[in-house]
Image (cartoon, rainbow, N blue to C red):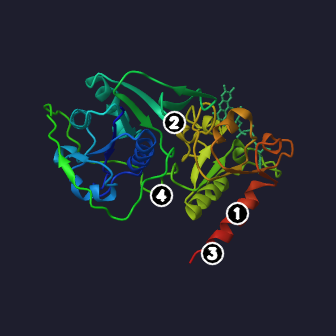
Amino acid sequence: MESILVLTHADESGSALTKQSLEAVTAGLELSARLSAPLTIGIVAENPQPLSKSLPSAGPTLAVSGLSFAQARYATDAAACAALCRAAQPTIVLAPASSRFTRVMASVAHRLGGLIDTHISAISGIGPLEATRWFYRQRVEAVITRAARPWFLLLDPGAYPAYSSQPGTASTEEITAELPATRTTVTGFRAPTQGQQTIRPDARLLLVAGAGWTKKQPDGQTHVPEAAELILGFLHATGASLGSSKSLVDQGGEGNSVLPFLTHLNQVGQTGATPRHAKGLSTCCHGEEPHVVGWRFIADRRAISLDPNCGWTRGKADVVYIADAFPVIAKLNALLEAKKP
Ligand SMILES: Cc1cc2nc3c(=O)[nH]c(=O)nc-3n(C[C@H](O)[C@H](O)[C@H](O)COP(=O)(O)OP(=O)(O)OC[C@H]3O[C@@H](n4cnc5c(N)ncnc54)[C@H](O)[C@@H]3O)c2cc1C
């Protein structure tokens, strides 16, 4: 009979479990109900006791605690996860594919003599158990079964809803992890300030900028500073995430940074990202297949393009506005500004 362990960790504040951890909890609960298999939850955190209150009391909760687990560090996180696995003796381990756990989980699987699969987007089946993942930029879907146990599955973000409940009463059992000598001291985080950060995976809306923003416009001139102002104004007013076509970010190479807030990390498409926002608005982009394939998981797709024959109009967007994006976004920004409380 299978037994399930869900591994979770605290967020940077230390006062809550990460959203991705709570998504893994939902996956664990679903799997446990389907297989009638016992479920254990493991926590890696400095102070896990209050965090366990946000968890279901369906099974035991195990935790490592102490200052060593306040920050992500390979040696201590790997030791913590391995200790939780040894204590729970699971056949299936579910964990969020956060940067913190992705970095250590292959090693934990190796220490436990198990096998690992990553980028899991769904778990189904009863016998045999089936894990689903995508290959080749979401073009090929694979369903994996394995006889080897323990089987570690790293769950991609957004594949399951985050578990939420009234504050519960689950209490934790403390597990001791044998820590190796550590050489790494985490001194803090350095990240772009909120205003500079343009990639926001949790935003409802994705705004995509295409190369058209930098092209000569009907007056025969380029209007790049104005384009930058309009795009940033829209992001500021809506909290949307910013994506880009490849053509536009490629212009940033060779020292020719056109829109300085865009990097290849913003690129959406076959050789870029495949974001999962509820809505997407493409601007000044042709909607070619290598770009649009990255929109696979965007539920509502709209585009603004001057070209009535562009890829978007050929069935790739739900709504296409054949219009000049400059005045359209300027008007939108003005309306958003006027609606501000
Ligand atoms: C192997 C391979 C992988 C690739 N991977 C990717 C990928 O991951 N992501 C990606 O994006 N591309 C990718 N590409 C490139 C892709 O095929 C296209 O070349 C690219 O997406 C085009 O970008 P674009 O639409 O921004 O630029 P363009 O093709 O130059 O289109 C600009 C558009 O802007 C419109 N426009 C101009 N001014 C305005 C205005 N004022 N208002 C409204 N519209 C305006 C024009 O009508 C035009 O349609 C790949 C290509 C290959 C061969």
Q: Quadrant of the N terminus?
A: top left
Q: Answer yes or no: do the residues labelled 4 and 3 have beta carbons within 8 Å? A: no
Q: Marks 3 and 1, Cα distance to the nearest angstrom?
A: 14 Å
Amino acid type for the residue under numbered disc 1 = Ala
Could you say whether the residue bearing mark 1 is in a helix, strand or loop?
Answer: helix
Asked if 34 appears above or below 10 in the picture, the reply is: above
Amino acid type for the residue under numbered disc 4 = Gly
Amino acid type for the residue under numbered disc 3 = Lys
Ligand 1 neighbours mark 1 (CB distance < 8 Å): no
Q: Marks 4 and 3, Cα distance to the nearest angstrom?
A: 20 Å
Label 3, on which residue? 339
Residue drawn at x 14%, y 34% as measured from the top left: 178
Q: Quadrant of the C terminus?
A: bottom right
**Whole-percent x, y for residue 323 in the image:** 81, 55
Ligand 1 neighbours mark 2 (CB distance < 8 Å): no
Residue 257 numbered mark, or none? none
Q: Nearer the viewer, residue 236 or 4?
A: 4
Q: Marks 2 and 1, Cα distance to the nearest angstrom?
A: 47 Å
Ligand 1 neighbours mark 3 (CB distance < 8 Å): no
Ligand 1 neighbours mark 4 (CB distance < 8 Å): no
Asked if 97 appears above or below 279 in the picture, the reply is: above
Label 1, on which residue? 330
Q: Earlier in the sequence, mark 1 or mark 4?
A: 4
Could you say whether the residue bearing mark 2 is in a helix, strand or loop?
Answer: strand
Residue 195 numbered mark, or none? 4
Could you say whether the residue bearing mark 4 is in a helix, strand or loop?
Answer: loop
**Whole-percent x, y for residue 151 in the image:** 37, 28
Amino acid type for the residue under numbered disc 2 = Ser
Q: Earlier in the sequence, mark 3 or mark 1?
A: 1
Q: Earlier in the sequence, mark 2 or mark 4?
A: 2
Residue drawn at x 48%, y 58% as measured from the top left: 195
Residue 124 numbered mark, or none? 2
